[in-house]
Amino acid sequence: MSENLWEHRTETGYLTGTDLAGYRVEAIDGHIGKVDKHTADAGEAGVVVDTGVWIFGKEVLLPAGCISSVDTETGTVYLNRTKQDVKDAPEFLRERHDGDSDYRMHLGEYYYGRTML
């Protein structure tokens, strides 16, 4: 895959400067939670998704490359991942989120290993 997983892709409809926090999150096969935190920093863009009771309150960090589209009218982020992909994802570690390149590499390896739809 040649594109950077940690960048917003232009075809998603994401508008620079839009804060996705609070948006509903839909996987390919259904609702999985809401965006708790959004980062649009160059090379580090992604969303922290709070899955709520669906998988017992787990939070996961999804690289921006996992977003297939953004609907600002309905406040919804659509993923190119399944619910199972999100459920199996490494849990979000707040203490390692900022500036930890090893953590991002670990997450990238998980997401690169799954087919993007």
Image (cartoon, helix red, strand yellow):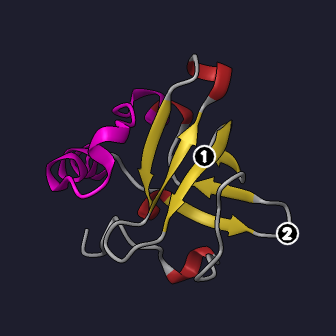
Residue at 37%, 51% (x, y): give it: 115
Are discs 1 and 2 less than 8 Å apart at CB?
no
Q: In front: mark 1 or mark 2?
A: 1
Residue at 24%, 52% (x, y): give it: 104
Q: Quadrant of residue 77?
A: bottom right
Please give the range of residues in magenta: 85-113
Residue at 57%, 20% (x, y): give it: 55
Circle 1 residues within 10 Å: few <14, some 14–19, many ≥20: some
- The question of residue 105 being in magenta is answered with yes
- The question of residue 78 being in magenta is answered with no
Quick check: 17 above or below 73? below
Q: Quadrant of residue 52?
A: top right
> Percent x, y for residue 27?
61, 44
Residue at 36%, 77% (x, y): give it: 42
> Any mark on residue 36, and which?
1
Give the left or right position of residue 69, taking residue 43 as reference: right
Amino acid type, mark 1: Asp
- In this view, the residue in front, 6 or 94, is 94
Question: CA separation, marks 1 and 2?
Answer: 18 Å
Residue 27 visible from this viewpoint: no
Circle 2 residues within 10 Å: few <14, some 14–19, many ≥20: few
> Percent x, y for residue 63?
40, 57
Q: Secondary structure at mark 1?
A: strand
> Any mark on residue 73, and which?
2
> Any mark on residue 13, and which?
none
> Percent x, y for residue 110?
27, 43
Q: Secondary structure at mark 2?
A: loop
Give the left or right position of residue 17, taking residue 85 as reference: right
Give the left or right position of residue 75, taking residue 8 as reference: right
